Every structure is written in C-alpha cells, then in structure tokens.
Image (tube, grey):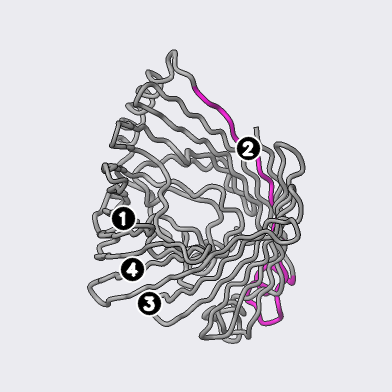
Amino acid sequence: MRPRGNCEPAKPPKQSGGRLTSLVMTFVFAAAVALADDSPFELGGHTKFRILGQSYPDDSLFRDLAGATSLDAAGEVRLNFSTKRQQWSFFADYQLLGLHSEFLPLVASYREILPAGLPNDDRRLFDLTKVLHDGSDTTIAHRLDRFWIGYTGEKAVLRFGRQALSWGNGLFFSPMDLVNPFDPTTIDTEYKSGDDMLYLQYLRDSGDDWQAAVVFRRDLLSGDVDSDQSTVALKYHGFAGEQEYDVLVADSYGDTVIGVGGARSIGGAIWRGDVVVTDSSTDTVVEVVTNLSYSWVWSGKNVSTGIEYYHDGVDSNYVAASLMIELSPLWMMTPTLISNVDDQSALLQLVNQYSLSDNMTFLGSLNIPLGESGTEFGGPGSGVPDRYLSFDLAVFAQLAWYF
C-alpha cells in the first residue's frame, strides 16, 4: 500500500496565515455565539485510552531502535458541541490528546519511515492544534477537530470550516475518497480527522444530488495556501432504477482526477465499485476497487461479510475480506484479512468489540503479519542493509467511555 499520513520532511513553522486564521475563527465563533443564544444545543463526547504492544523479529529496524518489544499508550478526551437555529448550524469538536511512545525520540531522525504520532495542522488552512508538552517520549496536544458553520435550505447545504468528508464505494480501500482517507488497517474508525474546506450540496427533485468541496491546503515550505496542494472536487450522485452511481471530477494536489462508481443489489448482496483515473505531469494512474457484501442470520446470530479487490494503479493488487459475527447483543467479533496478492503477504486482524455498559465499550485487536521479509506486510525494506520495517505480533486494546 502507498504510505499515508504525516510522513513528510521537517519544515519551518508557518510564516503566514496566522492573522487570517484568527480573524476567520473570531468571525465563526461570534456567529456560533449568536446561534447558541436562546437556541438548543447538544454537548457530549468521550474519553478513550488505548495501548499498543508490539514485538519485532531479529531483522527488524524497529528492534534495533526500540528493542525486542515496545508498549505505546495514548489517551483522548473529546468534547462535541453543536447548536442549531432555523437553517443555521454550528459544530465544534475539541480534542485533548496524549501519546507516550518509545519511537517519539526517533521521529526527527526517521521522519521518512516513522509516523509523527499525533495529527498536526501543517498543511491545513487553519492552525487549530497546539502542542502543550513535547517531551522525550511523551507528547500532549489539544485541537479543534471539527469547527464549522453551515446553512441547510430546502434543497441546498453549505458548510465552511473544519469538517470531515467521505466519498467512494470502497470497504477497505477508497481511491475516490480524496480527503484524508482511513488507512485500510485502521482499527478505530469512529472519527475521521477533519480538514478545512468549503462544502456544498444541492438536492435535485429526482433524488440525485450534486456535491462540491474545496479543501484548502498549505505548502509545507512556504506556509502559503497553494492550489497545487489543495483539492477542488465535484461529484454527482444519481439513481438509475435500483442502481446508484457516482461521477467525480477533481483537481487534487495539482493532478486531474476523474472517477466513476456505483452500487447495486444482486440477489440480496450489495455490489459496489469505483474506477479512478489520476493524470499528473509525469504519469496516468488507474485505480480500481470492487467489493461484494452480504448479511444473513446464522443460528440466531447476525452475520455479515465483505470481500474486496483493489488495484492501486501502480504495481500492486490487493484482496481484503472480513466476517462480522454478532456472538451476542454485546459482543461482535470481526476477523479481517488484507493481502497483497503480488508479494504474497498479508495482515490478519482479529477484532473484537464488546459493550461493557450503556456508555462503555472495549475494542481490541490481535494483528498478525504474514509474509517474508522484504514484502509489504512481512516487512518492507528500510533503506538500511538487511533491516526491515517489520513486526512479529501486535496487540491493540482500547477502552472508551461516552458521555
């Protein structure tokens, strides 16, 4: 899989945009106060605490850096505020994040192969993240992950600010999702990180709709908003009988993107798929994803399964499959296998979700890599001779409390 996330070279701090950010946020906050005055509002959120334990084989670069095993811990407090007055609405989601990791001291030296750990706003239009503590192995930050004001009319929707957007018909891989897609191996997908954008939707009388998004991003070196780093996208979602279809046209990171996709029912199962063509100054890449999902009741238990094929448009083909079994009304188990067909490697995830009470949930996963060293899931090369970015076994455990 192509790397995703904040794996980018170090850069100087932003030199511009701070005053604009302050002015816009002041305006939006003032509008929010006006909306909230004598208007009903909702306040909720959650706290999450998670640990990730990993072991490393002898030829792993991680073993050289952190030892035979590592144990990382992360915590989050999230407060979700929303209010509405007539057609106007306002959302603000606050996050307090903490991470303790044995890899943090190595991020500066190995930024090209190790994730930074916590989200940042280096590319985003507004700088709504502040680091409170940056120690040798612990980082604490707080941020606004949602911060938008919107208008909803009879047929039109308009939102501006930090928000999330998800497009496409993929179950694991989402080539049509141009804005901050989840990695296929992500375990907790409850919230996608927000991005700063202008979003518009227009609903036609037929039930079809137009959606448009302008995602503002900054150049990492200059700190200025750059059209070659931003995304402007237009998508049409329509119905043809019992079938649904999508047509996408976009300019993303300076590349032209055209996509088509759809979904339809086949004998009780749902077949979905997307074809996305990205034309850059150096190459044209065609990505294809198609999947089939089906749900049924087996021995009184709800069961659903999905299988997906993905071609990344470059040199890799993937097959992913999952089986969700509702072992009890409180316990769901989901074995998932994501495989690279070309190098014969895979990742097996045994995910369990258990409801401990009305407002407390446990989420856990056992992650087992399969494949030889030098393969994607067995451990790709690190650039260091005879050393790979590999792990033997990983255990993820998370406890969430909602309020």
Q: Position of residue 82 (x, y in %)?
A: 47, 29
User: Can residue 213 be seen in the rendering of this structure?
Assistant: no
The image quadrant that residue 68 belongs to is: bottom right
Q: Secondary structure at mark 3?
A: loop
Reply yes or no: does residue 47 show up in magenta.
Answer: yes
How far is disc 1 from disc 4 in space, using C-alphas?
25 Å
What amino acid is found at the position of numbered circle 4 in the picture?
Answer: Val
Residue labelled with disc 1: 219
What amino acid is found at the position of numbered circle 1 in the picture?
Answer: Asp
Cβ atoms under marks 2 and 4 closer than 8 Å = no
Q: Depth check: give the residue in front, 286 or 108.
A: 286
Residue labelled with disc 4: 276
Residue at 46 percent of width and 33 percent of height = 92
How far is disc 1 from disc 3 in space, using C-alphas?
26 Å
Mark closer to the chain start, 1 or 4: 1
What amino acid is found at the position of numbered circle 2 in the picture?
Answer: His
How far is disc 1 from disc 2 in space, using C-alphas?
33 Å
Cβ atoms under marks 4 and 3 closer than 8 Å = yes
What amino acid is found at the position of numbered circle 3 in the picture?
Answer: Gly
How far is disc 4 from disc 3 in space, using C-alphas?
9 Å
Q: Which mark is residue 313?
A: 3
Which one is closest to the eye, mark 2 or mark 4? Answer: 4
Q: Which mark is residue 75?
A: none
Residue at 31 percent of width and 43 percent of height = 199
Compared to 133, does 110 lie above or below?
Answer: below
Q: Depth check: give the residue in front, 23 or 355.
A: 355
- Lateral position of residue 131 relative to residue 21, left or right: right
Cβ atoms under marks 2 and 3 closer than 8 Å = no
Residue labelled with disc 2: 46
The residues colored magenta run 41-68
Q: Position of residue 90 (x, y in %)?
A: 41, 29
Which one is closest to the eye, mark 1 or mark 4? Answer: 4
